[in-house]
Amino acid sequence: MHSERLGTDYKAAILRAEAVLLPDFDAWRTGGKALAASPPHAVGTLDWMFAEYRSDRRYAKLDPKSKRNHEVGFKLVGGYVLKDGKRLGEKRLTAIDTALTDDLYEKLILKITDAVGNVNERERRTTVNHAMKSCRRAWNVVARRHPGRLPLVNPFSQMGLRSSNRETPTAAYEELVAFRTKAVELGLPSLATAALIGWEWLQRETDIFATFDVSHYRPKGRPNMVRIIDEKTRQKGWIPLFDDAGAPVYPELMAELDAIKRDRIGGLMLRRDRGERGPWPTWPKPDQPDFTHVSRKVKEVIRAAGLRDDLSFTSFRHGGFTEGGDAELTDREMLAQGRHTTVKVLPKYTKRTTRQIVNGAKKRRAARTKEGHLSE
């Protein structure tokens, strides 16, 4: 067995992986024996419906995160054990009605089975809501795929799902510092820099790991600015790095990015810290970056630092917004920093927005200094 590069041609890489490498790997893993095929699901059962949905083009084109969410839901619902000892997935679709799904919903919300097999009661409304929506989607798609095979009434529709009151956990500045310190200790300085970018420039994972290019930071034409691209809102703009007096607005972050750029010619600004130093995300599809590896490494750092387990990378961006509110930024300054405005009005307020970004950043740093956070 040996590793090999798949190259930069996405289609060619997929074709070689599926036609050559994966079969070779399976043959090596099984000693040349054919893999046992999973038994087919009985037609008309819930398991069959899930399998049919997976084989549909509408499922195939989903991004990896959406597929994982669907699979979690299918496992949760299909794996539910009924009183007769059978799984719900084995039940025929004609026997699944609205009364059953409503009852299932209430039971799934409260019951969680841990790795040891103990059943604990704790609300997990968001997870169960996603599971019901996944089943609803699968039912609708398979009903169109096989007209007349499924009951006309989708029992997962119109369930009156109530959303969870849980908000995205917000990191405090002390938690940001602890995360960054531990990330550096673990040999992951790029994650430390990424967390600070999320905090200071209020950017999302996609913007930081999959969009932020070396050429965006202090280019020759604008050596005192950084180009910010917001993939979600499709907004692009320039953030000034120095105030009118020539003082750096983001000294810690700029020092780290300056050091990175000195050793780079081009490409993504933040890359993995080990091995071949490839990009942090993977791209199962050219326009759909997958951040599974990022999330896992971030969680490792959070736990190693002894921080709250419910924190995530998004928590640092939310923490930056909260710091802005605590620093009493005006609504206009918050909009300017977070790029929460329509693209149509940006040209009209370009000069005004630039000044607001500087003022907002200085207010935040001033508020931070008053609390004793002079540096990291």
Image (tube, rainbow, N blue to C red):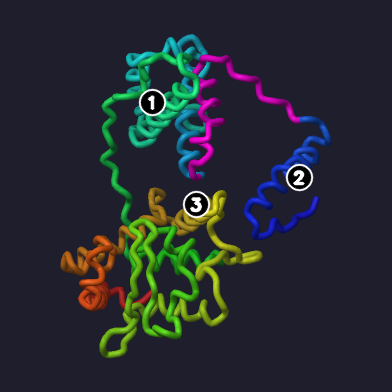
Determine which of the numbered discs, if any, sits on residue 39 in the image: none
**Amino acid marked by disc 2:** Val
Q: Can you say whether 37 is above or below 64 in the image?
A: above
Mark 3 to mark 1: distance in Å?
31 Å
Q: Is residue 172 visible?
A: yes
Q: Can you say whether 358 is above or below 301 in the image?
A: below
In the image, 295 versus 74, the foreground residue is 74
Mark 1 to mark 2: distance in Å?
42 Å
**Amino acid marked by disc 1:** Leu
Q: Residue at x 33, y 32 (%)?
A: 123
Residue behind mark 1: 108
Residue behind mark 3: 288
Q: What is the secondary structure assignment of the residue under circle 2?
A: helix
Outermost residue toward the right?
32
> Tag 2 or tag 1, which sits nearer the N-term?
2
CB-based contact (under 8 Å), mark 1 and mark 2: no
